[in-house]
Amino acid sequence: MFDSLLAVLNEDGPFVGAGLVAMTPQRGIMILLSLLLAWLAIKKKYEPLLLLPLAFGMLIANIPVAGLSAYDEGGLMNFLYQGIVREIYPPMIFLCLGCMTDFGPLISSPKSAFIGLGGQLGIFMAFGASLIVGNLLVPVIPGFEGFTFKEAAAIGIIGSSDGPTSIFTATRLAPELLPSITIAAYSYMALVPIIQPPVMRAFTTEKERAIVMPEPKKVTKRQKILFPVILTILTLLLVPAAGALISMLMLGNLIKECGATERYVGTLQNDALNILTLLVGISIGCSAVADRFLTPKTLIIVCCGLLAFIFGTIGGVLIAKLLCKITKGKVNPLIGNSGVSAMPMAARVSQRLGQEANPNSHLLMHAMGPIVSSTIGSALLAGIFIAVFG
């Protein structure tokens, strides 16, 4: 009867107060959650450039009758959301990130790629945990059917600590989980300075943390120009599903390093990146509507995301400890936390903990090698997941 009355009242458009009439407790919870995220962005400065538009998008999407969710056909947010659905925003963000990235530390120290490889442990842990926990909870939670391999693969990429890669993979493999995966990924990225230090201290000794690493070798301009070209060719030949992300990342880097396109550099590093970040934030926020977000799957995704960040950090630190042994103390294991590609926060955490142990230690540039290798590795792994499960 109530639905019939509401339909009649809305025949000529939404009536005054229609939103109040259609409000539900679930939508109220989402609005409160959006206000919490906005508070974290404004007050605590947790990823504010992305978290603030995301929170506002979540707020307006959950106000009923307004028609401002990503799923309201013909609405403004539905059009903006097409940049996610049609896989436009993530590769374009990679183009901007490539223009801000210096691959010099990776080129000068190729062994740091192994640390980035170790950081991918979190992806596999989250992938396996979502399948195992999902199956265990099927008989416990009414209506819950667990996770498919596609969904588990999309959840696993949270461990990449790379928001655009998580968005790109979720769009391909599990679009219905996109809001939960994206919010979990960016939330934990913002919490890297809180999550990683206890893990890093637990898996390193005081002596290891005080190691002073030698200055990185100098890299020529020719090497920096050849690197993105060669990597793009190899990626497109071997893992074409990752081509959109890697090719845009490498194009951005080539624009930066070639020295002939300075006008592009300024635009990509500032204006373009800011606009794309704003569009991604509000688009993802507007997709987080109550009936899609407040599910058992979201809680499991949040838990698996935390597991992914912890084990990604552990994997990177353990590989760095191994390299420390092999090189007879020339690698500080603290840079292992940068095996997760939370750029540049993870490198700052390495630097801070290194200086606490030894004021003469400068790990920032050394940590950038594992970070950029992890960015490349996680994009390649996402491409493999898409090829295998998609």
Image: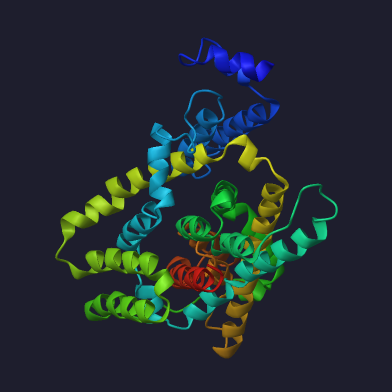
The single residue placed furthest to the left in the displayed view is 260
- Establish if 10 lies above or below 388: above
Q: Where is residue 371 shown, x and y percent of the image?
A: 47, 68
Specify whether residue 154 is in view.
Answer: yes
Residue appearing at x 51%, y 28% in the figure = 60
The image shows a total of numbered marks equal to 0
Specify whether residue 356 is in view.
Answer: no
Camera-nearest residue between 83 and 113: 83
Instruction: Give residue 271's quadrant in the image.
Output: top left
Q: Where is residue 329 shown, x and y percent of the image?
A: 57, 84
Camera-nearest residue between 194 and 245: 245
Judged left or right of residue 224, residue 294 is: right
Say which quadrant the N terminus sits in: top right
Q: Where is residue 81 shown, x and y percent of the image?
A: 42, 43
Q: Where is residue 156 shown, x and y percent of the image?
A: 61, 64
Instruction: Give residue 93's quadrant in the image.
Output: bottom left
- Establish if 217 lies above or below 28: below
Camera-nearest residue between 226 and 355: 226
